[in-house]
Structures are given as structure tokens and as C-alpha cells.
Image (tube, rainbow, N blue to C red):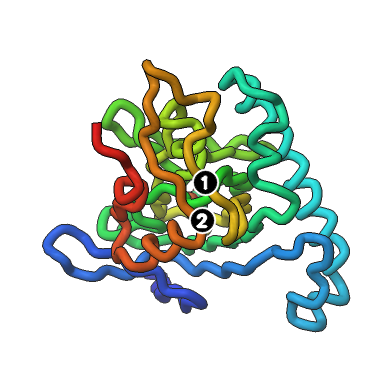
Amino acid sequence: QQIIPRPQNFTIITSKVEGGEKVKMWSECFSHSWYPIEDLTHLLPQEIGIQYGEAFSEYAREIGSLVRRVLGLISTGLGIEEDCLVKILGDEPRLRAQANFYPPCPDPELTLGLPVHTDVNVLTVILQSQVSGLQVIKDGKWIAVPAIPNAFVINLGDQIQVLSNGRFRSVHHRAVTNKLGPRVSMAMFYGPNLETIIGPIEELIDDEHPPRYTSYRFSEFLEEFYKQEGSRRMVKEVFELPN
Ligand SMILES: O=C(O)CCC(=O)C(=O)O
Ligand SMILES: [Fe+2]
């Protein structure tokens, strides 16, 4: 019988399961900032930086323009100016990348790759290898997001929920493991920078749609995020207005 070693974590993601027990997630993840997005060369370890820095920068710019296109479509869908969301997020969005590696797991029933969460940013572009593992909650049930070759998955994050005054919701998702083979995913987070003020967009507030959230500086949102532990954080709720 083949013995599969537990992953050596760069960052060990732990999560509290019911009853308060902390469990380790069956994954390795490497997370780094892509800000400023113009030049990544100096952010990477020297050898990698020299070899791949330029390609990474180009990739970041491409992802940036993809996200801005999607933000334009979402704005149009909301009935506001096409560049409204892009303008709010400004020229220096917070761009982070997280590479997730999920080794095969002998008993996937016992653990998760990533616990259930929503992304705190605006939009996330996910590139996944050809092994399914990402799941989203729909009508109270977990459904698998198919791994389509060369396709990106785009997740709505918490800030879209607030900006759209609740018309869009951030997506609860998780990653499961499997016995058969390793899975890799790359999540590219596009979010406000720390100084950006986030709140329901004015055009989306009227008598029928009173503001559902207060406005806050994004750094305040993150402060709240890090204050709360575990995977089921209730961060948006802190900024929710009563009614
Ligand atoms: O592995 C995946 O598909 C999900 C990754 C993810 O949700 C994250 O990094 O926030
Ligand atoms: Fe996520």
C-alpha cells in the first residue's frame, strides 16, 4: 500500500469545525501580493524573478483587464455606468494571488482542501487543473464546479455584495480533496486597496432599496476579517444596517 505523506504546508490553513476543534486543511498554499501590478520581478525570489518576472507581470495585467471587463458587464447589469465599479476600485486595486495545491488524500471524507468561505475581495479569477474539487452552495446544496480545460471560474466576493446593495451575493465555496490525483488551482483576487471607501453605490439606493450596509474604508473590513477566527466569518454582517 502506498503511503501518502501529509502535505508540508507553506501556510497551514486551519479551520474550526463544529465543537471548536481546529483541523488542518489538506492543502499547501502559497499566497503573495501582486501590488503594484506593473513590476513583479522584485517581489519574486531572485532566480524566479529573473526568469518569470516579466511573464508574471504580463499575466497580472491580462487578468486585471479581464476583471475590468467583467466589472463593466456587472455594472451594465446593475443599470449603472459601465465604468462605475472600475472607477470606485481605482487605478491601484489590491491584487493578490494564491496558488493552492491539494495532494491526493487517502480519505477525503475526513478533511477538506479549503473550508467553506466567501472571498473578501471584489472578484476572484480561478484557474483550476483538470480535476474537479471546487464546490459552491446552491439552494442549500453543495454542487461541484466542473473543471473545464482553459476556462476561468469567476467568483463574486463580499465587496460586490456591499457595492451592489445586496443585489449580488458573494458565493460560499469550498474545495474538497480526492483520492485519485493531485489538484492545483490558482486564485487571483482583485479587490479595493486599503484606502478605498466601500459602500452601497448611490444609484442603487432608493425608497424601495434602502442602504443595506454602512460605508467603510476597506482596511476596516480587513481588520474585522482578521479579528474573527475560523472559516464562517460574519464580516459583512458587522457593516449591515438594521431593517
Ligand atoms: O481551489 C479552488 O478551486 C478554490 C480556491 C479558493 O477558493 C481560494 O483560494 O480562495
Ligand atoms: Fe475562495
In the image, 203 versus 164, the foreground residue is 203
Q: In this rendering, is residue 12 above or below 86?
A: below
Q: In this rendering, is residue 163 above or below 81?
A: below
Which residue matches tag 1?
198
Which residue matches tag 2?
218
Q: Give the amino acid at mark 2.
A: Phe
Residue at image x 39%, y 32%?
Answer: 211
Q: Under tag 2, what secondary structure?
A: helix
Label 1 with label 2: CB-CB less than 8 Å? yes
Q: Which quadrant of the figure contains the C terminus?
A: top left
Residue at image x 29%, y 32%?
Answer: 141
Q: In this rendering, is residue 150 above or below 18?
A: above
Residue 7: % across, % down:
45, 73
Camera sees residue 186:
no
The mark that comes first in sequence, 1 or 2, is 1
Q: CA distance from mark 1 to mark 2?
A: 6 Å
Residue at image x 30%, y 26%?
Answer: 139
